[in-house]
Image (tube, rainbow, N blue to C red):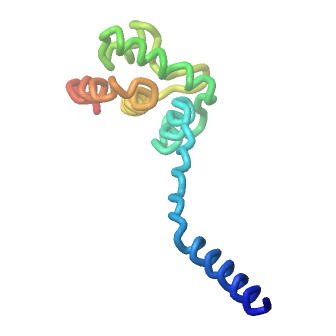
Amino acid sequence: MRIRTTTLAAALLLSTLTACGSEPEVADKAKPTPTVSKEDQFLAAVDNAGITSWTTNGPTDAELLDYPQRWCDSFAEGHSADYVLTADQGLLYPLGEGWGTQRDEANKLLVLGAKAYCPDLADQVTADLRATGTY
């Protein structure tokens, strides 16, 4: 009986070890990439752009976030980048009380806004600016 118990225990141990080694490895499930909002994407890009116009006084995030969707709406209506930044064409030039933006940096903001808010129009915005020689 003792031999049978030892043999049975050894067989169980062997089958457990074999089963552990023969189990298919479970592939690590790909963790979803956290989604970055268009607002956060735009603000991060603006922070990285180093807008010198705002060295002493610049817009709040809320003030700045007022622009990109309106720019994209205007682009979607077929307006050019130059049209969007012309002050008498809809007041979409990025400026506020106590802060303003140099034109070359406003051009940069348009592109950053388009990339975050209307990426399908970003190439057209860049082409518009290049055609004017201002980008």
Query: Which of the two residues, 68 or 103, is positioned nearer the viewer here?
Result: 68
**For residue 10, side relative to residue 30 (left or right):** right
Q: Give percent across and percent down for residue 117.
A: 45, 25
Residue for point 30% across, 16% down: 80
Residue at 40% over, 24% down: 118
Q: Quadrant of the C terminus?
A: top left
Residue at position x 54%, y 66% in the image? 23
At which x and y percent is residue 107? 37, 29
Q: Is residue 70 left or right of residue 55?
A: left
The residue positioned farthest toward the front in the image shown: 1
User: Would you say 14 lies left or right of 67 here?
Assistant: right
In this rendering, the count of numbered labels is 0
**Vertical side of 21 occupied by 115: above or below:** above
Quadrant position of residue 57: top right
Instruction: Residue 102: name its quadrant.
Output: top left
| Image position, residue 127 (x, y; %) | 24, 27
Residue drawn at point x = 57 percent, y = 76 percent: 18
| In this picture, residue 58 sits left or right of residue 132 | right
Residue 103 seen = no
Residue 81 against residue 5 in the figure, above or below: above
